[in-house]
Amino acid sequence: MGEAWAAQNKSLPAGCTLILGGIFCDPGRTVLLSADCQVELPEHSCEKHDEADTRMFAHIAYSVQILHHKWAVVVVTDTDVIMMCMYYITHMDGLQEMWVKTMDIFLPVHAITEALVGKYDVAASDLTSLLFSTYVLTGCDTVSYLYRRGKRRAYTTAIKHLTDPLPLCRYGDPEESLDVQEEVITAARRYMVSLYDRSDSGGNLDSQRDGHCEPISL
């Protein structure tokens, strides 16, 4: 498919630019196409990166930082991607508006994020990091979902304990160490315990497990 698109780049409308990745015979190849040019983008070439959900944000970053676009529209029905949109609207310098088209609705992610920041009076980057990290921790495409704890509980618990999970939420920030510090582990543990909130839990995961899992008789 990628080769066919690249061969017809001169038929693209004026002012239209495409960034294609993951659809060539070479899975790592990424190409920028317009009616005037065809440019290889080796900085976006990663043959082991076959997850389009995350790869599209590298393309958006290139469009914002190099091509100087200020708006982005993501067409998606996957909640994982919508959460990433909320994260990146506050972490991608130069991006002013992020829209999500899901079904026949356009969601203004930038406006939703701004409203949440005003409601909870917290830094935008901290809020979206909090929502994204706790969303991932409580179940997504690559992480198992928790026992009888849905996303509504995950959200309300995160907001209720707004500052406690911040070491976890800030883990992986640019220019920060990727070594997992004790404060990150402690923040994750406390958040998981708070999701079940049993007064007799003793504040540890072992007690939570004993309280929610029944022994099996063989």
Image (cartoon, rainbow, N blue to C red):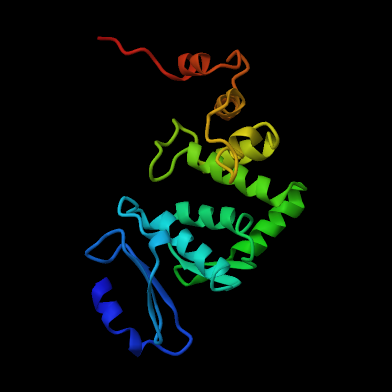
Name the spot of residue 172 as percent of width and height, x first.
Answer: 55, 41
Q: Is residue 170 visible?
A: yes
Name the spot of residue 195 as percent of width and height, x first.
Answer: 57, 30
Q: Is residue 101 visible?
A: no
Towards the viewer: 207 or 97: 97
Towards the viewer: 15 or 87: 15
Query: Quick check: 7 left or right of 211?
Result: left
Quadrant in which residue 166 is drawn: top right
Q: Is residue 140 above or below residue 201?
A: below
Query: Quick check: 11 left or right of 134?
Result: left
Name the spot of residue 204 as percent of width and height, x first.
Answer: 56, 16
The residue depicted at 30 percent of the width and 54 percent of the height is 47
The residue depicted at 67 percent of the width and 45 percent of the height is 126
Quadrant in which residue 94 is drawn: bottom right
The residue depicted at 73 percent of the width and 48 percent of the height is 123
The residue depicted at 56 percent of the width and 68 percent of the height is 64
So how many labels did they put on this image? 0
Please identify the quadrant where the C terminus is shown.
top left
Q: Is residue 183 above or below residue 7?
A: above
Q: Is residue 193 above or below residue 61?
A: above
Towards the viewer: 192 or 35: 35
Please identify the quadrant where the N terminus is shown.
bottom left
Q: Residue furthest top?
A: 218
